[in-house]
Image (cartoon, rainbow, N blue to C red):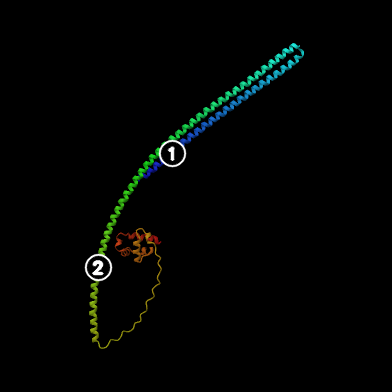
Amino acid sequence: MARPDDMRRLTEHLLEAYNRRAEDVANIRADTAGMLSDCDKARQEMAAEQRERFAEQREHLAEERAKLTADTAAMLTDLGKAHQEMTAEQREHLAEERAKLADDTAAMLTDLAKAHQEMAAEQREHLAEERAKLAADTAGMLSDCDKARQEMAAEQREHLAEERAKLAADTAGMLSDFDKAHEEMAAEQREHLADYRARLTADTAAMVTDFAAMLSELHTQTMETMAAWQEMSAEMQRRRAKVVAPPPPPPKVRVKPPPPPPPPVEVIPDDLTVIKGIGARMEARLNRGGIFTYAQLAQATVEEIREILGPAARLAKVEGWIEQAKELAK
């Protein structure tokens, strides 16, 4: 009786372990998703910060360029005004200064553009390194999660295999016990049937002996009756010879004819094998005894049923049959 409880507890333990492992895996996945979300948010914040820094640098360069352009325009205006007042030598000197200033301005703009390009390249390399590092960390984390999941699954499979083997052994033991109990029950039933067959054989032999004795006694009584009848016939003939005149005939008595028998009632037989303990042979014996329905069986007495069944009534639970028939006849 304890094995089904052990099996149920074992099943509940396995389900709890599986649910705990599933919760652990779900937590690991949630943590991984949170870390990935944090990394993505950090990357977006870094990109926004870089964009803001680039925007500030562009604004600063634009301001410097505008200021330089304004200064150059003012200087050129001043030079134009002074050019009208200067001599040719001074105009030549101013032209040289203007050319030099233009070269310096172009060089400055070239250096600024080169510095901007170098800064942008450096920022791209830094972002690429950060992205590669984040991808490597994410891949390592996912590999660790997958390895942990595989180890957990292998452990669960081993545990389930052990429990399955134990359950198979317990089931085999239970089946062996059932087979042994079935064999013992079958042996007990065979012994019981052998005893019943022996008793039935003895009862049949006794019935045959009693029937032979009854036939012999009936034959003797028949012979005695025939002898007495012959003697009585001879005596009647002698008396008839002594009588001269026959006696007057007796007066006629009118006898009323008996009433006609009631019309036969059609009986719809019930399935008596529904009653526990009544088989096809017992039903046939009850039918030969005039019992076809539950109501007839319920109204009969125990002695009447035993008389109908004969020797087979020894093993029959007639009282239980009558109680079941009363329930079915309602």
Relative side of 47 to 241, left or right: right
Per the model, the C-alpha gap separating discs 2 and 1 is 81 Å
For the question of whether residue 79 can be seen, the reply is: yes
Relative side of 84 to 20, left or right: right
- Image point (24%, 68%), residue name: 212
The image quarter in which residue 79 lies: top right
State the residue position of label 2.
212
- Badge 1 amino acid: Tyr
State the residue position of label 1.
18
- Image point (24%, 83%), residue name: 237
Residue sitting at the far bottom: 244
Mark before the other along the chain sequence, 2 or 1: 1
Q: Quadrant of the C terminus?
A: bottom left
For the question of whether residue 300 can be seen, the reply is: no
Vertical arrangement, residue 233 with respect to residue 168, above or below? below
Q: Position of residue 131 (x, y in %)?
A: 54, 28
Q: Position of residue 226 (x, y in %)?
A: 24, 76
Vertical arrangement, residue 105 with respect to residue 192, above or below? above
Where disc 1 sits, the SS reads helix
Vertical arrangement, residue 310 with respect to residue 121, above or below? below
Vertical arrangement, residue 187 with respect to residue 45, above or below? below
Q: Are marks 2 and 1 in contact (CB under 8 Å)?
A: no
Q: Position of residue 33 (x, y in %)?
A: 51, 33
The image quarter in which residue 250 lies: bottom left
Depth order, front residue of 70/296: 70
